[in-house]
């Protein structure tokens, strides 16, 4: 499949000299459902912030469709949607519909197109009923789906989701996961950052495990050594299931 993103020998050094990323070489292809897993502080969020130009490499480079991300920021941010772990950080509209419409409006699209995209994104997120509601009145799971809807309204090629199940209850996890699985079925690339593999690993086409700013594993999820999950700060999802298809909360 064609490459969407490529990280080449990427390194990131913090102002105090500490290493956040070191020697990361990784390609993300069109149509993948890529899970990037690792303990808190492993570098998975920092890595993907580089993908959309929210962080600047100390070494190496990041490419979007073969061109440096830093030179293609407008195209990158139209094609790659990023849903932050803190969904509330992305809430800026007085109503859910206004919030979702913000991105398309910034593209200076015609009003009819903005409305069309807004309705379609709210419907995809099962929030069509909430268009006139204030985001503050929605539950945690509904706000998480609203953040995803805001990204979908931009009609991106790829959606990156940072710990999308954080602080959600069981029904909210299921509804969020259903939305994410639907995004992938629709043909978009999905990159999901998580340490909760037991909820979502069944949906992955590829697994990357990070540790201390480096890639410890990159490949078929079934090929990851089943005894190594706890070594990298992850709950072993294979404690009870016998098949990877069981590793989904849907």
Image (tube, rainbow, N blue to C red):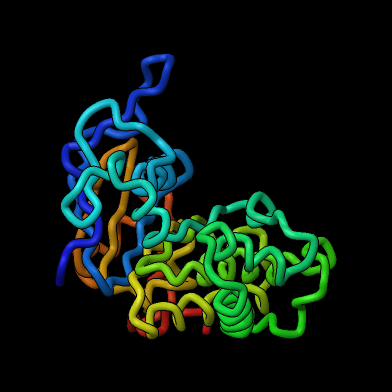
Quadrant holding the N terminus: bottom left
Question: How many marks do you count on the picture?
Answer: 0
Could you say which is closer to the camera, residue 247 or residue 45? 45
Q: Is residue 28 left or right of residue 175?
A: left
> In the picture shown, does residue 146 fall above or below 125?
above
Could you say which is closer to the camera, residue 98 or residue 137? 98
> In the picture shown, does residue 171 fall above or below 207?
below
Could you say which is closer to the camera, residue 85 or residue 147? 147
Q: Please give the name of the residue rendered at 64% of the width and 57% of the height, measured from the top-left corner.
A: 87
Q: Position of residue 168 (x, y in %)?
A: 67, 65
Can residue 233 be seen here?
yes
Q: Is residue 5 left or right of residue 80?
A: left
> In the picture shown, does residue 94 fall above or below 244?
above
**Which residue lies most toward the front here?**
110
Can residue 125 be seen here?
no
Q: Position of residue 226 (x, y in %)?
A: 28, 64
Q: Is residue 55 left or right of residue 71?
A: right
Q: Position of residue 189 (x, y in %)?
A: 33, 70
Q: Please give the name of the residue rendered at 82% of the width and 72% of the height, measured from the top-left corner.
A: 133
Q: Please give the name of the residue rendered at 53% of the width and 79% of the height, measured from the top-left corner.
A: 179
> In the picture shown, does residue 100 fall above or below 55?
below
**Which residue lies most toward the top here?**
16
Q: Position of residue 212 (x, y in %)?
A: 34, 36
Q: Quadrant of residue 110?
A: bottom right
């Amino acid at each position: 499949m064609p490459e969407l993103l490529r990280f080449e020998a990427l390194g990131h050094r913090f102002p105090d000299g500490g290493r956040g990323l070191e020697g990361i070489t990784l390609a993300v292809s069109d149509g993948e459902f890529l899970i990037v897993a690792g303990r808190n502080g492993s570098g998975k969020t920092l890595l993907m912030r580089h993908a959309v130009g929210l962080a600047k490499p100390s070494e190496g480079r990041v490419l979007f469709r073969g061109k440096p991300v830093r030179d293609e920021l407008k195209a990158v941010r139209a094609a790659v949607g990023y849903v932050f772990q803190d969904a509330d950080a992305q809430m800026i509209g007085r109503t859910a519909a206004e919030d979702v419409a913000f991105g398309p409006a910034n593209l200076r699209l015609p009003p009819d197109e903005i409305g069309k995209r807004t309705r379609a994104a709210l419907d995809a997120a099962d929030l069509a009923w909430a268009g006139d509601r204030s985001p503050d009145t929605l539950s945690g799971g509904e706000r998480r789906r609203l953040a995803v809807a805001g990204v979908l309204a931009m009609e991106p090629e790829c959606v990156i989701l940072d710990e999308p199940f954080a602080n959600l209850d069981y029904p909210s996890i299921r509804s969020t996961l259903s939305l994410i699985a639907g995004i992938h079925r629709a043909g978009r690339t999905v990159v999901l950052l998580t340490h909760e593999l037991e909820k979502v690993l069944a949906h992955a086409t590829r697994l990357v495990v990070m540790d201390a700013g480096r890639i410890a594993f990159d490949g078929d999820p079934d090929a990851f050594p089943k005894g190594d999950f706890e070594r990298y700060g992850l709950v072993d999802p294979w404690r009870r299931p016998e098949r990877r298809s069981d590793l989904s909360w849907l």
